[in-house]
Amino acid sequence: MSRVVFLLSVLLISIFLIPREVSSSYAGSASAIINPSKVKQVSWKPRAFVYEGFLTDLECDHLISLAKSELKRSAVADNESGKSKLSEVRTSSGMFIPKNKDPIVSGIEDKISSWTFLPKENGEDIQVLRYEHGQKYDPHYDYFVDKVNIARGGHRIATVLMYLTNVTKGGETVFPNAEEPPTRHRGSERSHDLSECAKKGIAVKPRRGDALLFFSLLPNATPDTESLHAGCPVIEGEKWSATKWIHVDSFDRMVGAGGDCSDQHENCERWAALGECTNNPEYMIGSSDLPGYCRRSCKAC
Ligand SMILES: *[C@@H]1O[C@H](CO)[C@@H](O)[C@H](O)[C@H]1NC(C)=O
Ligand SMILES: *[C@@H]1O[C@H](CO)[C@@H](O)[C@H](O)[C@H]1NC(C)=O
């Protein structure tokens, strides 16, 4: 009995102490930006959430204007080689905005990192897309199945899809494999507002400034097949969106692809001297598909 009381006190103490510590260490970043009352859960399977008003009008317009001059037909990754190619599966136009391009882009990226708890360096460049009448993206996964794309930063763990414009009709993001949550959230989207495509699953209607976050990996690090999603055809109006794909590991750190023999961490030499090349070869040396961080110090290249 006293053991139960003890455990309960520990639990209560943790509940009261931990949030305080977290909020003080994040003061000025997450707690200052992220307003939990704006976040709505869309689905648990896959894990998907909408943040209402994530971007300001200024941020939306800025992303659109950066993209407007450089749009070109969007590509998809080839299943086997990982190479970029055109496909009828994806008919939008798009371009990438280099990370930290300017203070506004950088601010958006900080905000994404605060919301997702994932480091900024794990994110790819933001991709801005324009879908005109009839354009869409058929159901697909954001995780890759080819080895080339996984080599940089590992799997994509999460996607933040930001809507930059309202769309009069169509253009919803739909999760056709999603499991209905017990309390039907779909009711919150008035179904007469949704296109036929969107009715095939749990759907999110594009609203200027809103952001959709969903996870492509399960907490056990395997791909979540329920994260299958599609961009429904735009029926009326024009849809602009901005996507941030986030990996499990740094996307900024370029892996030494073959010729380049260098260490990726300043402590490599010291770790090698301590025997880590043999004790921890997965991290230090890696494999040909996913090179390790200290190949030079381990004399593996
Ligand atoms: C590529 O993979 C997707 C989903 O994993 C599949 O639907 C599609 O048929 C594949 N394409 C080819 C050319 O193998
Ligand atoms: C977009 O739609 C929302 C309601 O769904 C509305 O409040 C907002 O004013 C609209 N924005 C623009 C730019 O039309």
Image (tube, helix red, strand yellow):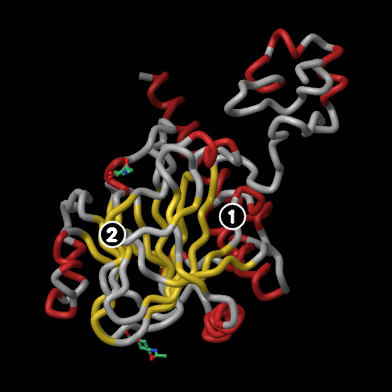
Residue drawn at (66%, 27%), measured in percent from left and top? 291
Q: Are marks 1 and 2 in contact (CB under 8 Å)?
A: no
Residue drawn at (41%, 73%), measured in percent from left and top? 52
Amino acid type indicated by mark 1: Glu
Q: Is mark 1 on a helix, strand or loop?
A: loop
Residue drawn at (68%, 67%), measured in percent from left and top? 106
Q: Which residue is under mark 1? A: 124
Amino acid type indicated by mark 2: Asp
Residue 138: image tag: 2
Instruction: Confirm if mark 1 falls within 8 A of ligand 1.
Output: no
The answer to which of 12 and 241 lies nearer the viewer is: 241
Q: Nearer the viewer, mark 1 or mark 2?
A: 2
Measured as percent of width and height from the top left, residue 136 is found at 31, 68
- Other residues around mark 2 within 10 Å, as few (<14) / some (14–19) / many (≥20): some
Q: In this view, does 15 lie above or below 103?
A: above
Measured as percent of width and height from the top left, residue 139 is found at 27, 55
